[in-house]
Amino acid sequence: MADYYDVLGVSRDADEKTIRQSYRKLARQFHPDLNPGNDEAAGKFKEINEAYEALSHSETREKYDKYGDQWKYADQFEERAATGSPFGGHSSGYGGSRGFSFDMFGDVGDLFGGFGSAGRYSAGPSRLTTQVDLSLEEAYHGALRTIALTEPTGTRRFEVKIPPGVDTGSVVTVRPSSDRELQVETTVLPHARFIRRGPDLYTDVNVSMFDALLGGEAEVNTITGRVSLKVPEGSQNGQRIRLSGRGMPVLKTPDKKGDLFVTLRPQLPKDLSGEQRELVEKLKAVS
């Protein structure tokens, strides 16, 4: 996997402002809305968002610097390192400062005869872990996933309800039986239109130069549908407007929602008619 610093085109000692500026530039360049039908641009846009997710906050950046592309498992690695064993409990010669990676043994489930394509032992014989990918919309509304676990007696399937508001790294715990615990870790995939930071969402909207100058309205896509946004008179490029309660549900309190921050992007006309040019020149003369 490509180094996230290289993906964003920044040095490893870049500050958060530099990372944010580089991300915004690249996100605009490769945004799917500006590259319709371009699979290469869509893949690049996804990679840019993944890199920014890791490097945009000091806590996640520290994990990435230490664990690379497995940074999302940092807490699990460190927990195992603290016990001195990749399987929990007493030391078996691994762990310590090296931490733990599933790559040490391949698929951990294979060590125990297999628990399906997704299920794996983590901290003991009664606990299984698996991962599921979710779209941002599924993370907003909640979702159902069927988890298949292969055991000596056959394959068992469990329907797991993913609650609204989960984020990458959230863990949903269910107990299929009294002696077994299933932990489902969620990964929320990057979205083509929204950037997520906790419960808040961020998006850009293009507005005409005239609406930016004189005020007007613009249609904005929210996670639940389109709404009309009032564009203030004299709006500047990069000006941000908050739409309260239009963000993501807060995990465990889904009635409470974050906000949607809309960044205005005034668009200059490319081809002016003679009359339009004359009017602009008059405006310039009196400014």
Image (cartoon, rainbow, N blue to C red):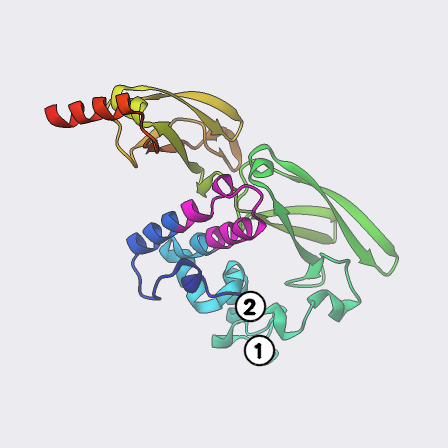
Q: Earlier in the sequence, mark 2 or mark 1?
A: 2
User: Badge 2 local density, few (<14 within 10 Å), some, or many (20+)?
Assistant: many
Residue linked to disc 1: 94
Q: Is residue 68 visible?
A: yes
Q: Position of residue 65 (x, y in %)?
A: 42, 66
Near-viewer residue (42 or 145)? 42
Near-viewer residue (279 or 124)? 279
User: Badge 1 local density, few (<14 within 10 Å), some, or many (20+)?
Assistant: some
Q: Amino acid at mark 1?
A: Tyr
Q: Position of residue 109 (x, y in %)?
A: 73, 65
Q: Which quarter shows the N terminus?
A: bottom right
Which span is picked out in magenta? 26-50
Residue linked to disc 2: 80
Q: Amino acid at mark 2?
A: Arg
Residue at 72% over, 63% down? 125
Q: Which quarter shows the C terminus?
A: top left
